[in-house]
Amino acid sequence: MSTQEARRWDLVGRLRTTVDAIERLFGGLTTSLLAIAALVWLAVTAATCLVGMGLLLLPTVPRVLRAVADRERGRLSRWGPEIISPAPAPADFRAAIRDATVQRELGWTAIHATAGFALGSLGLTVTLWAVTDGTFPLWWYLLPADQAADTLGILPVNDMGDAFLVSLMGVGWMVVVMAIIPIVARVQAWPGRQLLPPDPASTDLALRVAHLTATRAAALDAHTTELRRIERSLHDGTQNRLVAVNVLLGAARRALARDPAAADAILGNAQDAAEQALTELRGVVRTILPPVLTDRSLPDALTSLATTSPVPCLIEADVPGRAAASVEATVYFAVAETLTNIAKHSGAKQVRVLLRRDDDRLWAQIIDDGKGGADERSGSGLAGIRRRVEAHDGTFALASPAGGPTILTVSLPCGS
Amino acid sequence: MRIVIAEDDSLLREGLALLLRAEGLDVVATAGDPDDFLVAVDEHKPDVAIVDVRMPPTHTDEGIVAAVTARRRQPGLAVLVLSAYVEQAFATELLASGSARLGYLLKERVGRVQEFMDALQRVAAGGTAIDPEVVAQLLARNRPDNRLERLTPRERDVLAAMAEGLGNTAIAERLFVTEGAVSKHIRSIFAKLDLAPDDRADRRVTAVLHYLEGRRV
């Protein structure tokens, strides 16, 4: 009894495995169709390259490969150990084709588009046979009399007895399906499992985690520093000015009775202090989040910033749409801080700020014709800019040979 | 009255000096940081030091530290600490060695010149001036016993004024009652709080403050 039961359960388990495997094969067939489409796209690009137009399409190839491969990664992760998506492919096409991950994705696409497609079709065809043959007695009489036969056309069917024979063949096919489908599904997934995980040589996940941890910590740190800066400027600037106004007004009231002329002079001081308070308050508010940045656009904000720069500054912006507010604010401060630095240290006569958006990254480049030799270790605001930018997972590059020019390039993921 | 001012904000420093001189007081030196302040105290031996809490280099509690140091070097120096905001820890730190010749006021009180002058005089004369804001925070604090609840609203007003360092006359003026009534209230308060009655203003303030801070004398 117990052994029988065990066998029955085994059959149920087997059936379940088979249904699972059929589902996987079907999924694999879908991604193999996508892989075929990717190969077709590659061929079209290569062909049009001959007439020059394809050159414009080239950058899309790694992205198409990545999209298809990511789909397969997601599929494989659902059915087995998770396959983590690698870091984004280099934006530059030449760098991308030299990228090991992209090369492996290309290899996988070729295999999956051919072998993966063939295995998927075969497996599903056999399954289909098992179903059609197995259910044959139910619908064979609908077929034209001389055409009724099993799926392979071996056994002509003329009556119900023949039809039941065919359904026995269907059971035979079912056995075949249960025997081979799980294996076929595994074989179909194998190239993906081998080729699609991130290249261990180029992507050290531990390093990435360490970097993310460090930048997150830097983000919190930058946040605290920022709050402290705001608190300090409010306390030392605005609040002290207002206290001074208060003190001077008190003094003026006392002087009013004794010596009206002195009172007037004190009131003048009080007014000066009030004006300073307003100026400083305005300054603090602007540095928290420039109103123009929220009301208008980043280029507008930078243009208004340029008008206050002591060194003549030209903004060349080409950014359709908006990025996340925190990203725009970070770019704004990177530019603001750099312009301050340039005015203080570089002796430049002209600054150019280039702003552009490239897919999902916002790039800003600040170029001055000053004396160069800028060093982020020298305690200028450069280290602060780097921290803020890296806290947003951005990049920071400074080129400043002695004699100039100085070029600072920052880029941040847009987050939108 | 000879006064030294320590305040890092120059506008405020000059404003204070102007105000005090206009009131006929003798501002003998002004300093922008704790070191200059201590030098000025050593040099001029003032009667009163007016000290800002936040000063360079770290802008945290340099003023308090400098005031405590100055008092150690020159016992009997009256210190009036000015602060942009109320910080209970600063008050506790200051009052650790008694409340005589000590003041702790919010900066904005300076604008009410008459009250500020009164506080300054009181501190210089050996009394105490604690900002009403500090007292309010102390009164609002949760404490293990609920003896404060036994006080009538009037007695709470008197207690607050006492904690600020006001003498009976000043309390009577503020609350528009007679000095006799104030004395009666005070006796009642001390009885209700189980404190030993004391007629000397400074010891009385210390007792009240210590009670409010949750420490027994």
Image (spheres, grey):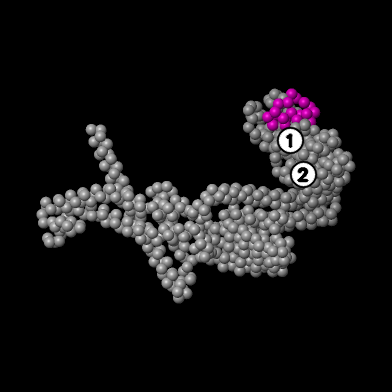
Range covered by the magenta-colored residues: B196-217
Is residue A411 something one can see in this rendering? yes
Residue A40 against residue A26 in the figure, above or below: below
- Kind of residue at badge 2: Asp
Q: Quadrant of the C terminus of chain B?
A: top right
Question: According to the image, label 1 marks what residue?
Answer: B93
Left or right for B28, reference B115: right
Residue sitting at 46 percent across and 65 percent down? A60
Splitting the image into 4 quarters, where does residue A64 fall? Answer: bottom left
Q: Nearer the viewer, residue B196 or A145?
A: A145
Above or below — where is B58 with respect to A157? above
Q: Secondary structure at mark 2?
A: strand
Against B160, residue B37 (above or below) is below
Q: Residue at x 44, y 51 (%)?
A: A83
The quarter of the image holding the N terminus of chain B is: top right
Apparent side of residue A69 relative to residue A162 in the rendered image (left or right): right
Give the label on residue A72, or none. Answer: none
- Subunit of label 1: B
Residue A347: image quadrant is: bottom right
Element class at badge 1: helix
Task: Out of B157 and B2, give the one closest to the viewer.
Answer: B2
Which amino acid is tagged 1?
Glu
Q: Residue at x 44, y 54 (%)?
A: A196
- Is B204 inside the magenta-drawn segment? yes
- Residue at 29% x, 54% y is A123
Residue A266 falls inside the magenta stretch: no
- At which x and y percent is residue A202? 52, 55
Residue A392 spot, x, y in % from top left: 57, 54
Name the residue carrying label 2: B52
